[in-house]
Amino acid sequence: MSKFFPSKQDVTKRWALRLALGMAVIAGNISSSVCAAQSDPLNAALNEQVVMVPVISGADSVQLETTIYKPPGAGPFPLLIMNHGKALGNPRQQGRERAVVISREFVKHGYAVVIPMRKGFSNSGGDYVENACDMAGNGQIQADDLKATLNYIITQSWADKSRILVGGQSYGGLATMAFGTRGFPGVKGLLNFAGGLRLHGGSCPWQASLVNAFASFGKHTMVPSLWFYGANDRHFDPELAAKMHQAYVGAGGNAKLVAFGSFKSDAHGMSSSWDGVKIWWPETEKFLRQIGMPADETVVLSDEMPQQKTDFAALDNIDAVPYLKGAGREGYRAFLTKSFPRAFAVSPSGAWSWAANGDSPRTRVLANCEKNSKERCKLYAIDDYVVWPEVQQATVPLIPTAGSATGK
């Protein structure tokens, strides 16, 4: 989450730009992928790329919109192939999955992370296909895209085809467990974050179908897997998770179930929350060591470089923040209530921004602030300490520039 506030002198320019963009969209000159990129900047710290991967999946020759994160260097890197879930509604309207929380942890441990949008999702080609109440069949249909993506990725010089981990959340978890039956060379293990597919409405006994699907997957899978299901998961309750696990193991599969209790309002989203890392990473680290995959942190991300604390002011001294009055100080007050990671930035023009949770708050807060400022924005505070370096600013009247809306 983030918030920014512009200075008045920049508002007119911003509305002019919005009008120009809107006219371009009406004229058909801006594609949906470009618009998405504008609202979803790439993460430089993770070397984020978005590529269209040419694949042959089933009987289809298509391109799959694929997000790739890599550590610095040429590799080859061990691989995590991470698979997305399915939101309600038209899959074509589903946004590009970035899985930043999980990806960040794995990049820090030296992995390249590959996240394909499967057929019919987002900007990927082809059509989404669902095989009614056949959960095993649904999982295998999605697994076709995983296999096709991996066939392409292992031809890249930066990919270590002998060290592969496959993971997925929700429907992506079901696809991951289905993919485990393929015996793909180099795959050492599977991560299942609340895997399954829930059907809404109709007469399909989808819970029983899921249990049968996991039994069939367990019968034909040789590699070990690690599962995470929470007590207050609104899709798959603990009883169903236990039945799926029992069916999988009973059929010969090797799986450890981590039943981690309740998590916030819905444990189904645990893996996408920064607060969830402390739940899944310790278990995942042990799992990686057991299967012979890298588990040591080897990369310091550029946006996690330590920044020195200063004595400019106490963190909770709202009046000390330079250039702000009125709405800006209320913005800083709101920032102080946010959970970590978080950051607050300000500029001499009176523009300000805060960002909390989500991906790389430091990077986002500076980008948001500078969208609305003629002068460079600087970080004022990170997490629980002030980093403002310019002590001399304390002697300058803390008044926004003329016409700034921040003093209103």
Image (cartoon, grey):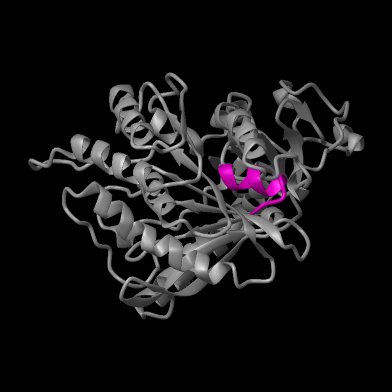
Asked if residue 18 shows in the view, the reply is: no
**Going by the image, does 202 lie left or right of 112?**
left
Residue extending furthest toward the left: 203
Q: Position of residue 353 (x, y in %)?
A: 63, 42
Left/right placement of residue 287 relative to residue 265 reads: right
**Residue in the image at 37% along x and 40% along y:** 195
Q: Is residue 315 left or right of residue 308?
A: left
Relative horizontal placement of residue 275, taking residue 360 as reference (left or right): left
Residue 55 in sight: yes
> Residue 106: within the magenta?
yes
Counting from the top left corner in percent of width and height, residue 343 is at: 68, 37
Question: Does 224 sit above or below residue 43?
Answer: above
Observer-nearest of 171 and 16? 171
Q: Quadrant of the C terminus?
A: top right
Q: Residue at x 85, y 30 (%)?
A: 309
**Which segment is the magenta one?**
102-112
- Residue at 42%, 47% (x, y): give it: 221
Between residue 341 and residue 52, name the one nearer to us: 52
In this picture, is 145 found above or below 312?
Answer: below
> Residue 238: where, in percent of width, then height?
33, 23
- Above or below, 332 relative to 12: above
